[in-house]
Image: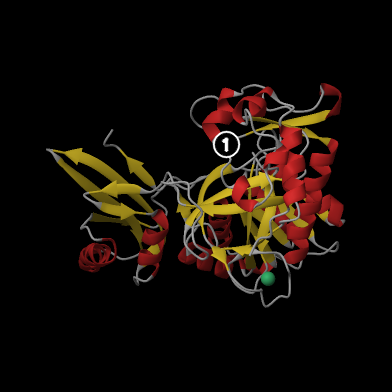
Amino acid sequence: MVSFNLEAVQNAITHAKNSEFYKNKLNGIESADIKRKEDFEKLPFTDKEDLRSAYPLGLQVVGDEKIVRIHSSSGTTGTPVIIPYTQKDVNDWAVMFRRCYETAGITNLDRIHITPGYGLWTAGIGFQLGAELLGAMSIPMGPGNTDKQIKMMIDLKSTVLCATSSYALLLAEEITKRGVKDKICLKRGVIGSERWGEKMRGRIANELGVSLFDIYGLTEIYGPGIGINCGHDSAMHMWSDFFYYEIIDPKTGEIQPEGEVGELVITTYHKEGAPLIRYRTHDLTREIPGKCACGSAFPRIDAIIGRSDDMVKVRGAMIYPSRVDELLAKIDGVSSEYQIMIDHVSGRDILTLFFETGLKDEALKTLEKTVEAEFKQTIGLTPKAKAVAVGELPRSEKKSTRVFDNRY
Ligand code: ZN
């Protein structure tokens, strides 16, 4: 269970109120008013829309002389969010990231192949900072150019692959296709920034021959590297000396009972450039009670189950992409990639589920029927299942979108 550090929260509130943004948001509330956890739980949330409204630098709390860098969230729509960092913020991030590598059993003898993008996005540079602080050799590839990725991976004997799950899958498939698996020295994969199913995890692990670790983070709160799983199971340890987290009901905003799924909300304890108080991540997870078998005292949350805003309702049924992942993983002959299209046709919502399979003809038709029946059984509505060949659904280097809601 995550512990609440009252003094750190009070300091964070005092500090945050140096910005116009939090002066307005926490109008009339002083840090001295927060005497216990229950007082803190009454504070208003900060949401992504609030951060957008502060564009470009409304979140900045300290003078320009202390800001060494900005990052921006990869907003595909609307105004981006700009997060200013001080040197201490950058250093704290690196310390957390090094801890992630260490938790995954990575040492200064490893060669870390970094494929997430560098630049405004926090990904690549975070992986780099942590690797350098650890003393490992970082190979700052960035995304794209699969030929070069594989060549460097072979020639430099990369031992750790850092990637999004969809890019790791793409590389795994290429390595298999080219028959170069025996030239690859990878031992571990550190996979971040999107939710992924067991089947995809299994394919990447098998095809690359690596153990996989889920790294957690978001640009608004430093970036990737604020938590990772330790290998005992899929739950992620969270670096709770740097931030406090809560799990809330995304509808009511109330704190969820321990162990129940809800939305992760984060408050930074020591962030200087742009502290955040009760920031809604929209990531769904749950608190894992008890101590981990690895002995670490850091509290744990479950692997991200989905986004509170990815949840779609079709003909009364609630659909989380993670439930579809699990469902498809149990069906023989279905590959890990799928896409859901929701359309409104003649007054009715129609859900079409595209999935990949190696089967053909009659066997393919039978598989479609099986998928429809299983989907109905688990989720409570009958989709139109359409099988396509393996490799036909789009792979991306960034985040894979699984659900396309064309109703609105
Ligand atoms: Zn552990």
**Residue sitting farthest toward the left:** 346
Disc count in the image? 1
* 329 over 191 or under it: above or below: below
Is residue 157 visible in the rendered image? The answer is: no
Q: Quadrant of residue 88?
A: top right
Residue type at tag 1: Thr
Ligand 1, image quadrant it occupies: bottom right
Is residue 1 visible in the rendered image? The answer is: yes
Q: Residue at x 65, y 36 (%)?
A: 121
Choose between 340 and 290: the one closer to the eye.
Answer: 290
* 289 over 42 or under it: above or below: below
Residue 285 in the image: x percent, y percent? 51, 58
Q: Residue under circle 1?
A: 46
Choose between 229 and 148: the one closer to the eye.
Answer: 229
Q: Residue at x 31, y 66 (%)?
A: 359
Q: Residue at x 85, y 56 (%)?
A: 134
Q: Is residue 235 toward the left or the right of residue 113 in the image?
A: left
- Label 1 element class: loop
Q: Is residue 39 toward the left or the right of residue 336 in the image?
A: right
Residue 398 in the image: x percent, y percent? 55, 43
Could you tell me which quadrant the N terminus lies in? bottom right
* 333 over 281 or under it: above or below: below
